[in-house]
Image (spheres, rainbow, N blue to C red):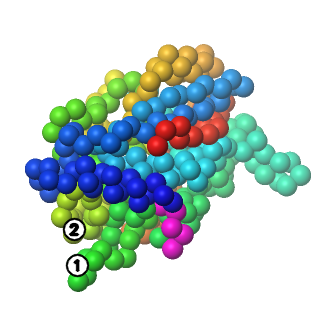
Amino acid sequence: MKFKLLGRVMCTLALAGAAVAAMSVTTGCNNGHAEAEITIEYDGISYVLEYTMYRNMYPQTVQHFIELADNRFYDDTIIHDYQTSNWYGGGYSYSEGDTDAGELSYAQAYADGKEGLLDYLELTSKEKEYSILADPQAGKITPSVYRDLREGKLVDPYNTLIGEFSNNNHKIENGALKNSYGALKFYYTPKNDDECKKHVYLDKYSSPLGVQGEYRFNSATSLFSIQTGTSTSSDNSHCIFATLNNIDVLKNLRTAVTKSYDYEDVNVYVDNYDEILGANKNQAQYRLTKKAIVVKSVRITKY
């Protein structure tokens, strides 16, 4: 994929000579902003959200998102956790169901209550699909987190994403993005297992080879969230990498959802393909709306 190499070279050159500490970047690097369109469908109406992504400050997060989008990973997925301040997506597919094939539809799952939704989430989870796509042997997702450093080389990559946020020592001198209405950020589920606090090696732009960080802060895969409130509680613990250009569109979508708002809370096992945690060890509670909020597509409109 040409973008992988080109993006890496451009940012490395732009940051060369900059006086930055390990695991920090500077806003002096600006090689152009990438742009994306996220098309969300609700109750038969499509809403197109237009985003500007800040590669100059969060180069590896932006690249990861672009690679997933280019592989159509996010197409026909759902907002699987509807919260006041954030909508979470990127983890489950949308299904209208095929009666002949015995497939469960989202609508039927909701009608069946918590058990139906639990079955639905287990059947439509994209964790396995992501693990296959992000396998280093596939060459489709650029590695950034590694198990070890041997003889000056990073070896044994994980399929997760480096955390470009301040709690992971990613420092922005000026202009760091803050939570704002519509802001797009990568999300990782909380991981309290002691194993997840162990240090891993990071292949971080503009930093010495072999910089380390805790795995739990470098364990994101495909989950993202769209800010729909004013809370700034996650400014320092998740990477906010894009801002929304057409805020009114999201406001209209949110109004439409609110008018017909009904939901069920479901507890489900997550991170079942996590290479540290393993299956059935981490649980999350999701709030699913009666009518599915469907991410029809994510398209990169400017690289």
Amino acid type shown at disc 2: Leu
Between disc 2 and disc 1, whose residue precedes?
Answer: 1
| Residue drawn 68% across the image and 38% down it | 110
Residue 169 is marked as: none
Are the residues tagged 2 and 1 within 8 Å (C-beta)? yes
The residue range painted magenta reads 137-141
* Viewer-proximal residue among 72 and 101: 72
Callout 1 crowding tier (Cα within 10 Å): few <14, some 14–19, many ≥20: few
* Viewer-proximal residue among 8 and 211: 8
Residue 180 percent location from the top left of the image: 34, 26
Count the marks.
Answer: 2
Amino acid type shown at disc 1: Gly
| Residue drawn 56% across the image and 66% down it | 132
- Main secondary structure type of the part rendered in magenta: loop
Residue with the mark numbered 2: 209
Residue 109 shows in this picture: no
Q: Is residue 81 above or below residue 245?
A: below
Q: Is residue 156 above or below residue 296?
A: below
Reply yes or no: does residue 50 show up in magenta: no
